[in-house]
Image (cartoon, rainbow, N blue to C red):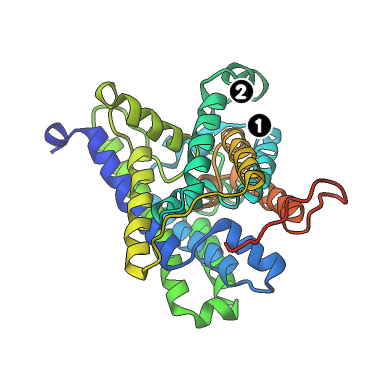
Amino acid sequence: MLDMIGEGNIAALIGAAGGIMLGLAARLGRFCTLGAIEDHLYGASNGRLGMWVAAIGVAVLGSFALIGAGLVDPGAIFYLAQAWSPVAVILGGLMFGYGMALAGNCGYGAVARLGGGDLRNFVIVVVMGLAAYFTLSGPLGLMREALFPTRPVEGTPLGIAQLAAEASGLPATAIGLVLGLALLGAALSIGELREDRRALGWSVAVGLSVVIAWAGMSWLARTGFDAIPPASHSFAAPVGETMLYAMTASGQSLSFGIGSVAGVWLGAFVGSLWKGHFRWEACEDPRELRRQILGAALMGVGAVLALGCSIGQGLSAMSLLALSAPLALGGIYVGARLGLRQVVEGRLLGLGPDWSRDTGA
């Protein structure tokens, strides 16, 4: 089957399967990073924040179940197998979060809204993808690597469960499962989420999309011949990769990231049609467009420095309890809070131009 279909095509299909679930969750379940933070800060509601915690809990439980069954090798996954700079991760998270607030969406949300006909997010997607590749392998690539080099980890993978297991002597799988259950329990303690079965169901779907990715790509890494590493969803560099493929498909092969981006767009498109929400929208305010372009550029650069976006670090890396994930998530939250203060309240630390907008996330 691998020879007939091609390993790159199979990886893209695995990415698309989870991506469609994520796209549907965005349009039908209102699963949104910035929307959750806005609700928490300005709407006196923690329901969508609870959806995030529940999704992470499900992803952690599923991922460590796979690790315990020997179906996923944590030492082969980038988030655990590469040493990284805490300064870069925190700085990148702050940049990403601030840019997300300016743009009005993260990369995943922008692709999902584009699937609903919002052409404003086409600009965000293009600029973010360009900025990510500009930082990853473009003019800023050498500077980034000189300032914040990465290198393979020797010894214990850089995961909370693995390091705790080394210190305590307890099995890493058991530690991961307990922490996953604790996260899921924390989410269910939020009454809004507990009473909204639809929201809870979509949270489970989001978490399972990450588990499907680790299971499928780990299987491909074990059985394939092209040394394709295990991967899960992220929406910064893969957006740029998708743009490159769109321009040079005859000389490129498909990948998990391309399938994931396409799957989110397709799932969001189907979900918006199902709900009757599909409509063409465009930006009519030059000030808004300026803010979105700046925010998208900050997200692209920040995601590369942080080694992932709100989905890449917030769900994929968190599902493995990678050490970098809480730092990146904390940076994204603080950056988003500062950005929302700039955009919603028209000030940043008491200063700054009036960039206020209707949130509507």
First reached walking from the N terminus: tag 1 or tag 2: 1
Would you identify the image quadrant in which residue 340 lies?
Answer: bottom right
Relative to residue 131, is residue 344 depicted above or below?
below
Question: Which labelled disc corresponds to residue 85?
Answer: 1
Per the image, the residue denoted by label 2 is 149
Name the residue rendered at 28%, 27% in the picture.
Answer: 249
User: Marks 1 and 2, Cα distance to the nearest angstrom?
Assistant: 7 Å
Packing grade of label 2 (10 A; few <14, some 14-19, many >=20) is: some
Name the residue rendered at 60%, 44% in the picture.
Answer: 289
Give the camera-side residue of 201 and 231: 201
Say which quadrant the C terminus sits in.
bottom right
Give the camera-side residue of 22 and 356: 356
Q: Are marks 1 and 2 in contact (CB under 8 Å)?
A: yes
Give the camera-side residue of 162 and 193: 193
Q: Does 332 sit left or right of 247 as displayed?
A: right
Name the residue rendered at 53%, 35% in the picture.
Answer: 127
Packing grade of label 1 (10 A; few <14, some 14-19, many >=20) is: some
Relative to residue 267, is residue 304 depicted above or below?
above
Percent of width and height locating residue 221: 30, 36
Q: Does 220 sit left or right of 197 as displayed?
A: left
Query: Could you tell me the amino acid type at mark 2?
Result: Pro
Percent of width and height locating residue 347: 81, 52
